[in-house]
Image (cartoon, rainbow, N blue to C red):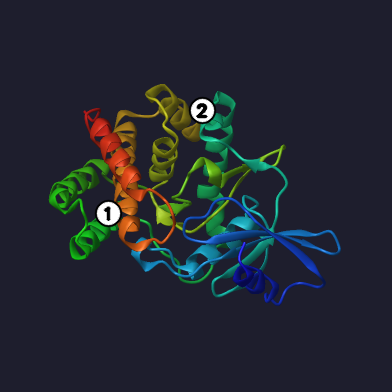
Amino acid sequence: MTDRALLEVEAIPFWTGPIKIWPLEGGTTNRNYGVLQADGQRFAVRLGEDKPEHGVMRFNEQAAARAAARAGISPKIYYTAPGVMVSRLLPGRSLSADEMHRPENLLRVAALLRRCHTSMAAFLQGPLLAFWVFHINRSYIAGLHKMGSRIAARLDALNETNEMLERRAGKVDIVFCHNDLLAGNVFDDGARLWLLDWDYAGFNAPLFDLANLSSNNGFMPGEDEALLNAYFGRAVERGEYDSFAAFKCASLLREALWNATSELSSGLPVDYAHATDEYLTRLEMALTTLN
C-alpha cells in the first residue's frame, strides 16, 4: 500500500480516533481498504474516480449502495463524498466461482437477486443510470473503432451479433439490477448472503442479472434451469429461456468488449488481451446453442 493511499484514507473526515489501514482484495475500477478504528469498529473504504469509458459514475454507484443498504442486501453506508465511500466491513468472505455452483447456493443467490429486484425501488432517490447491455456494447464497439483496437477487424461482425441478440431478447420487464454478478461480489457472512460493489448498477431487465450471474460463473444448462426456476418459483416458459440465452450471449460480448477497452485504457498489470480472447471464444460457443 502506497503512502498516497494511506494519506487519502486518513484524510477522510469520518474517523473519530487513530486508525489502522490495510488493502482489501478485488476492485478493477476502484481501490478498497479495510480500516480498524481505535474503538474496535471496522470499516471498508472504497476510492474511485468516474470511468466514463466503462459507464462507471460514482454518483450512481453511491446512490445504489445506499438504497441496497436500506433494503438490507448490502452493508450500511456511513459516509460518502465524490469518489469516496465508507461502509461497514462485514465478517466473512466472498464466494468462489466453484461455490456458486452448489445447489444450495443457487437457491440462496436466486433469492437474493429477487429481493434486489423487488425491494430496492422503494429506497432509490435522485438521478440514476440505466444499464442496457446492447447500448453498452454499441458504445464499446464505437470506442474501440476510434482507439484502433487490435480486434478492429472483428467489430462490425460483433455489432451485427449484438443487434441480433437485442432482437432475440424481446420485450422485458425493467427493475433495478446489480449487473456485475461475479462470485467475488456475492459475500457470505456465515449466516446470509450480501451483494457488494454497485459500480455498474442501473435499471435493466432482471433476466440480464440472471444471465450475467450464469455467464460470469460458467453455469451449465442444468444449473441455468435450476437458477431460473428458483428465481421465478416455477418452471420457466420457452420465451423466457430464449431471452435469458440471448442476454447470456450479450453478457459474454460485453465482457469481451470491456476487456478490449481495458487493454487500451487501464494501467493495471492485468492480461486483458487474454481475457478478451477468452470471452470471444466463449461467446462463439454460446452462440451455437441459440435455437
* Quadrant in which the N terminus appears: bottom right
* Quadrant in which the C terminus appears: top left
Residue 79: x %, y % from top left: 67, 70
Label 1 crowd bin: few (<14), some (14–19), many (20+), radius 10 Å = many
Question: Dot 2 corresponds to which residue?
Answer: 101
Residue 218: x %, y % from top left: 41, 32
* Left/right of residue 275 with respect to residue 161 in the rendered view: right
Outermost residue on the top side: it is 222
- Tell me which residue sits at (48%, 43%) in the image: 182
Q: Label 2 is placed on what type of residue?
A: His
Label 2 crowd bin: few (<14), some (14–19), many (20+), radius 10 Å = some
- Tell me which residue sits at (32%, 49%) in the image: 254
The Cα–Cα distance between marks 1 and 2, rounded to whole angstroms, is: 28 Å
Q: Label 1 is placed on what type of residue?
A: Asn
107 versus 62 height, above or below = above
Question: Dot 1 corresponds to which residue?
Answer: 137
Mark positioned earlier in the residue sequence (1 or 2): 2
178 versus 290 height, above or below = below
236 versus 273 height, above or below = above
- Tell me which residue sits at (20%, 50%) in the image: 151
Q: Secondary structure at mark 1?
A: helix
Task: State the image quarter where residue 206 is shown.
Answer: top left
Nearer to me, 253 or 25: 25
Q: Secondary structure at mark 2?
A: loop
